[in-house]
Amino acid sequence: MTMVLTDKKEVLKEIIENADEKLMSLMIALANEYNYTEQEYSQDELAFFEKRRQVFFDSNKKGSTVEEVNEKIRRNYKNGL
């Protein structure tokens, strides 16, 4: 039987509640390693990003703020899209 995410979180909460210092240190180190992402881009990738950025600016299109995007997503979700 596979566990859904909420069940896994509950199991982890219980483990954390009963954890000693060593286990907590290991869990923190594991989480930090998992969340650590160092991005390195090649010159070709950087050139592609710059070209794409310039095309956007040249198009005179308006970008959206995070709040505008979130509102649009919520509106579409409510409307069943």
Image: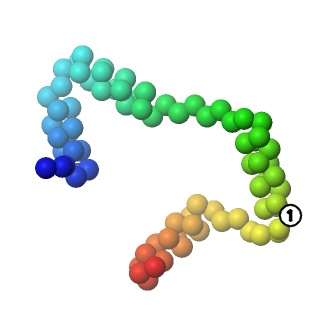
- Give the residue type at disc 1: Asp
Above or below, 13 against 7 in this view is above
Q: Relative to the observer, which residue lies in front, 43 or 76? A: 43
Q: Residue furthest top?
A: 22
At horizontal 36% and vertical 26% (from top left) the residue drawn is: 30
Q: Residue furthest right?
A: 58
Q: Residues within 10 Å of mark 1 (few under 14, many from 20)?
A: few
Say how many tags the image has.
1
* Residue 80 x/y as whole percent: 41, 81
Q: Relative to the observer, which residue lies in front, 43 or 20? A: 43
Q: Is residue 53 left or right of residue 31?
A: right
What sort of colour scheme is used for the picture?
Answer: rainbow
Q: Quadrant of residue 10?
A: top left
* Residue 9 x/y as whole percent: 23, 44
At horizontal 22% and vertical 52% (from top left) the residue drawn is: 4
At horizontal 70% and vertical 65% (from top left) the residue drawn is: 63
Q: Quadrant of residue 43?
A: top right
Q: Is residue 25 left or right of residue 46?
A: left
Q: Quadrant of residue 39?
A: top right
Say what secondary structure mark 1 lies in.
helix
Above or below, 3 against 79 in this view is above
* Residue 22 x/y as whole percent: 24, 16
* Residue 64 x/y as whole percent: 66, 65
The residue where tag 1 is placed is 58
Above or below, 2 against 16 in this view is below
